[in-house]
Image (tube, rainbow, N blue to C red):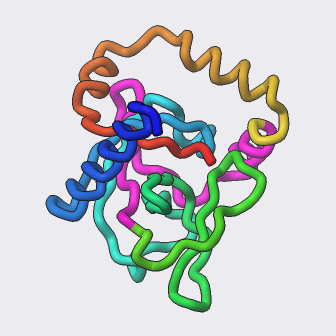
Amino acid sequence: MSAGDTWSGHREALAVDSLHLSGQLRMQVRGESMLPTLWPGDVVSVLREPLENIHKGDLVLAIREGRLFLHRFVARTADGGFIARGDSVSQPDLPYRSNALLGKVITVNRGGSAVKPAPQPGIPRRLLSFSLCHVGVLRRAVLYIHRRRKPHPSRESQTEEAKTAVSTCV
């Protein structure tokens, strides 16, 4: 195990503890599996919610084997768990147990603007998600453009406020 793996494990454990203690968490997105809904560098606010309050299309934070996932809630399973999926991945995640649910994303802060995540992406966004999933050169180009954008002045303070980061890429 590398020092990076150890830090990642500690960071994710801290995020889980913080969410359990305070009921809310702000964290920076690092992965790409939720493109174009969530971009690397976005800061999300997560509110602790029981599975009963989660609906199809909600963005949820879940944990599996010490790793955090921010994905879209798809359905409940017969055994009381749930299924989630990244917007730009071709297959849903393996089913999660009910206790893997940590919370629900209530706002996404990008470029100084906080917005509520859309419960279900429309057809244009779903087509873009599909394209980003299956056309690697398009994904790389879009991420390159995203990284090259001039940062908004408040973006630097958002990064400071994001005490933890999550990798959403499967």
Asked which quadrant contains residue 56, the reply is bottom right
Residue at 41% across, 13% down: 151
**Residue 75 x/y as whole percent:** 60, 76
Residue at 44% across, 38% down: 5
The number of numbered badges drawn on the structure is: 0
Residue at 37% across, 46% down: 9
Indicate whether residue 122 is drawn in magenta.
Answer: yes
Looking at the picture, does residue 153 appear above or below residue 44?
above
**Residue 168 x/y as whole percent:** 53, 45
Residue closest to the eye, 45 or 116: 45
The residue most toward the front is 1
Residue at 60% across, 84% down: 77
Looking at the picture, does residue 132 appear above or below residue 47?
above
**Residue 11 x/y as whole percent:** 31, 43
Indicate whether residue 12 is drawn in magenta.
Answer: no
**Residue 57 x/y as whole percent:** 56, 64
Q: Is residue 32 left or right of residue 128?
A: left
- Residues drawn in magenta: 102-131
Q: Is residue 20 left or right of residue 122?
A: left
The residue most toward the left is 22
Residue closest to the eye, 22 or 122: 22
Residue closest to the eye, 75 or 170: 170
Asked which quadrant contains residue 100, the reply is bottom left
